[in-house]
Every structure is written in structure tokens, then in C-alpha cells.
Amino acid sequence: METKKRIFSGVQPSGNITLGNYLGAIKNWVELQDDYECLYAIMDMHSITVRQDPKELKKRTLDLLKIYLACGIDPEKNLLFVQSHVPSHAQLAWVLNCYTYMGELSRMTQFKDKSKSHADNINAGLFTYPVLMAADILLYSADLVPVGKDQMQHIEICRDIAGRFNAIYGDVFKIPEGFLPKAGAKVMSLQEPLKKMSKSDPNPKGYISILDDSAVIAKKIKSAVTDSEGVVEFREGDEAKAGINNLMTIYSAVTGKTMDEITKEYAGAGYGVFKSDTADAVVEHIRPIREEYDRLSGDKAYLEGIFRSGAERAEKIASRMVSKVYKKVGFLPF
Ligand code: ATP
Ligand code: LTN
């Protein structure tokens, strides 16, 4: 029997999961789950690189598990777990820290952006964030890592670290590939369409949370910033069209229509109709997720069963890799 290739990915429980997180990552995970052996984790250790309220963090971690399930990730087929429940992640991250250069970490766009937005807390964890992410991926010898475009630089550094380690110690790590969705790899803010849609945006009008109710979603899309040209046409790289490009990307991702089809459909129609149809399409796409999320809300024992067994199974795979790495670097076995 042919063994399936492996996938690893995760999202941080650092805020309301946005349409960007969904279209850039989680929707793809759902589509890949039949063809790959998948591990999808909740990256709580990454989330504390920015200050979190402990009560909120605990609640959001469980909420994110519910979101994974509500989006259609099958806990029978996939291994779902919480990063901090599997000690191997921190163990491998320490070793990899010693094979990663300050210079390469200081080139990371996310570090530079977050150092600006959290200038009062530029901690060492924020700096070495990509090393922990490399450990997440390399522990499981993942072939593929489905993420949004903003994370591709972190996949590149992961490949570099793995290649460097392998060059010294032999074939220890599998070199992973990043994997982007066809539409929605970078969803932009609805209010500032030159910035990515982010769950930590202080202005909630900029993002759509996948748990926003229908009226709120429609309102946010209808008040999205566009331009005064009134032509529904996708023009890659044209900053003046960034707002409409973004809405077309969203519409395409939730309906499966191509940009050409959308342009034809709305020729001469103006933005009002297009925005209203986009709002309807997003609402209809998200409705079943919201319903399933509400249904799962009371079922604590079920959720606990999933993350407990997920952590046990993940640690079994991951601890083998940690042992192998410890041996390679020369730690005394016990
Ligand atoms: P934060 O704002 O707290 O840094 P985030 O919204 O960027 O968080 P992450 O948890 O860092 O979310 O990302 C989870 C996944 O969602 C990653 O694969 C990331 O690439 C993807 N993602 C995040 N924002 C977008 C976006 N605007 N468009 C497409 N994909 C996105
Ligand atoms: N850094 C990622 C979350 C993340 C991740 C990972 C994604 C942490 N570890 C491993 C894929 C694989 C982000 O989305 N900000």
C-alpha cells in the first residue's frame, strides 16, 4: 500500500479567526485531508510572543479547536492537538535555535512588522518565532505545509535550517514545501486594502471574523474601501484597485468563479450590486460553519477527548525525532 504524504499546519489562538485565516489556510486543509495524512495543531506557544490574557487564551484555544471541526476537519481522519501539550516542540526548537543565525531571523518581515506594532514588547520569543515554527514542521517530517502567503518566508527559513542541519549530520529532516491556495492566499483588510486582513487589527471593520453574524458581515463588506472608477475588474498590482481586487478575490474563493467570469458577470453593474452579491456569497459560505460551531459549543468532553488523544499520538511521533536529533548532536543517552 502506498503511504500518504504528510501535512502539518496550524493557526495561533490569538484572536477572532478571520476570513483571511479561513481562505488562506483552513479551507485548504479541509480540501487536502483525504489525500494526505494531516496534523493540524493550535499554536498556543507562538501566540504568547504577543501578550495574551491567560483566561482569554485558554478560551480561545478551545474555541479554535471548535472552529477547525466546524470548518469540516474530521477528527477521525486527522490528528488535532494543542502545541503546548506536546513537549517535543519546545525541545526541538531549542536545538534548532543553535543552528539559526541572528542575521537570517532579523530579515523576517513578520518580526519587523510586529516589532513596530508591539514596540513595548520586542521579546526574544518574537525573534525566534520562526525557529519554533520550523520545529513544528520538522518534528513530523511533513512534506507539505498549507499556509497563507505571509508565512512563506517562514517556510523558507525552515527549509534553510533543515538543510543546514542535514549538511552536518546526514539525512535527518525532510525538507518541506509550502502550499498556497488558488484564491485567498492573501486576503487584505477591508478598510486598508494595502494591508493584510489580520485578527489582531484593532479596527474590527477591517476584518471579517468567521463567527460574525450575517448582518455584521454584510455591513462590513458593503462598507469596504474601493475606488471611484466603478469597474469590477481585477488588475494585479494596481494599488488604486486594491480594494476591488480584494473583494473579487474573496468572491472568487467562496464561489469558485474565475476573475474573467466575475468581470463578465458584473460588466456595467457597478460596485453596489457586486458588493451585495459578495456579502451574500460570504454569508452563505460561512453559515454552516457558524451553525456547526454553535452546535459543538456545549460538548466539552468530546473536545477534550480529541485534544488528549491528539497530543498522545503526536508526542509518539515527535519524541522519536527529538531522540534522533539529540543523538546526532551528541547528548548523552539515558
Ligand atoms: P496575527 O494577526 O495574530 O499575527 P494572523 O491573522 O496573521 O494572526 P495566524 O495565526 O498568524 O493569523 O495565521 C494563520 C494562518 O492564516 C496562516 O497560514 C496565515 O498565512 C494565514 N493568514 C493569516 N492572515 C491571512 C490573510 N489575510 N490572507 C490569507 N491568509 C492569511
Ligand atoms: N506562524 C504561523 C502559525 C504556525 C504554523 C506552524 C503554520 C506556527 N507553527 C507550523 C504552519 C506550520 C502563522 O500562521 N502565523
Image: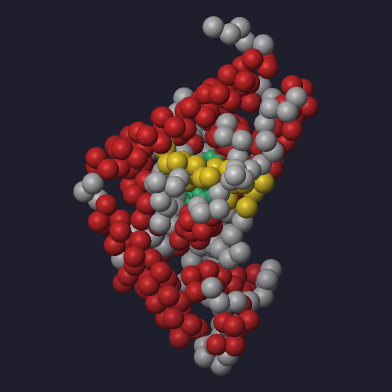
Q: Is residue 206 visible?
A: yes
200 vs 167, left or right, is left
Closer-to-camera residue (268/296): 296
Quadrant in the rendering for residue 83 = top left
Q: Quadrant of ligand 2?
A: top right
Closer-to-camera residue (120/28): 28
The spot of residue 269 in percent (x, y) is 52, 91
| Residue at point 61%, 56% (across, down) | 180
The spot of residue 162 in percent (x, y) is 69, 32
220 vs 37, left or right, is left
| Residue at point 34%, 49% (across, down) | 66
| Residue at point 37%, 52% (across, down) | 69
Q: Quadrant location of the N terminus?
A: top right
| Residue at point 58%, 19% (across, down) | 323
The spot of residue 333 in percent (x, y) is 58, 8
| Residue that protrudes farthest toward the bottom in the picture | 268
83 w.r.t. 90: above or below: below
333 vs 13, left or right, is right
Closer-to-camera residue (25/140): 140
The spot of residue 281 in percent (x, y) is 43, 75
| Residue that protrudes farthest toward the right in the picture | 167
Quadrant in the rendering for residue 265 = bottom right
234 vs 215, left or right, is right
Q: Is residue 202 visible?
A: no
Q: Quadrant location of the C terminus?
A: top right
